[in-house]
Amino acid sequence: MKPTGVWASFNCAIEGILWAARTQRHLRFHLMIAVAVLVAALFLRVSALEFILLVFSMVLVLFAELLNTAVEIVVDMVSPEFHPLARRAKDVAAGAVLMACGGAAVMGYLALTNYFFPLEKEGIPLLSRPSGDLAVISVLVVTLLVVLLKSLSLRGSPLYGGMPSGHAAFAFSVATATFLTSTSTLVSLLVLAVAVMLSQSRVYLKIHNMTEVLAGGALGVLVTALLYLFFA
């Protein structure tokens, strides 16, 4: 039945949140993370702007998780039997949660980076350039390009096969950023070795062929190197 007043609507909303927290393990996990972030904000004495970023990121993730739960309930009610479109609806809703978590991670990095990697110069932390921003942006750009290219590819599935290899692109983007920023040759070589082993494992497990892995690695290296060339 439709709520008859403002307080009834308010109570329904609270009931929905409590039911979701009681039944959805992922929502409980996000709530615990939110509590930890708020306590960390008090401990670090973050600024008002940094606190706004943290709160917005937490609300964004919790909103997406609640929306995902609502979509799953409606899909299960409408299509109790397996249906490809029902699966797609759940996958897309879960993708919304993943996107929200990615955005929250970036906002959390922007808000807290200066407390873990202090800048040499003084000033308002949030209005200064964050440490390692170019590396983070490079990896994000490479990841988005992989998603776009995989959406155009007619081979494989999002997590199995397809052109190019997302694992190789991500690994070599990180390796390239490490080479261009790290002062330690040993660290750079270790990261490169991990990238090579990760890429080789995709071929060994027959998830990708060599061409797809090489294309992913080249994408990660070229995009990251170009961004560093123009913006470092």
Image: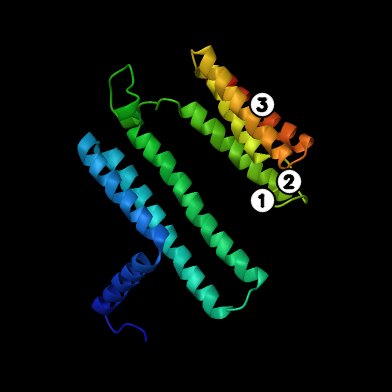
Residue 218 in picture, x, y percent from top left: 70, 29
Q: Which mark is residue 158?
A: 1
Name the residue type under label 1. Answer: Pro
Q: Gap between marks 2 and 1, in whole Å?
A: 7 Å
Element type where label 2 sits in the image: loop
Residues tagged 3 and 2 counted as in contact (Cβ below 8 A): no
Q: Nearer the viewer, mark 3 or mark 1?
A: 1
Q: Which mark is residue 162?
A: 2
Name the residue type under label 2. Answer: Gly
Mark 3 — residue?
Answer: 222
Residues tagged 2 and 1 counted as in contact (Cβ below 8 A): yes
Name the residue type under label 3. Answer: Leu
Residue 227 in picture, x, y percent from top left: 58, 25
Q: Is residue 20 left or right of residue 100?
A: left
Work out whether residue 137 or residue 161 is closer to the camera in this orientation and state it. 161
- Residue in the image at 27% along x and 79% along y: 8
Q: Nearer the viewer, mark 3 or mark 2?
A: 2
Find residue 208 and report its image quarter: top right
Image quarter of the N terminus: bottom left
- Residue in the image at 45% along x and 70% along y: 70
Q: Is residue 224 visible?
A: no
Q: Gap between marks 3 and 1, in whole Å?
A: 22 Å
Work out whether residue 65 or residue 21 is closer to the camera in this orientation and state it. 21
Element type where label 3 sits in the image: helix
Name of the residue lying farthest toward the front:
204
Q: Is residue 32 left or right of residue 141?
A: left
Colour mapping: rainbow
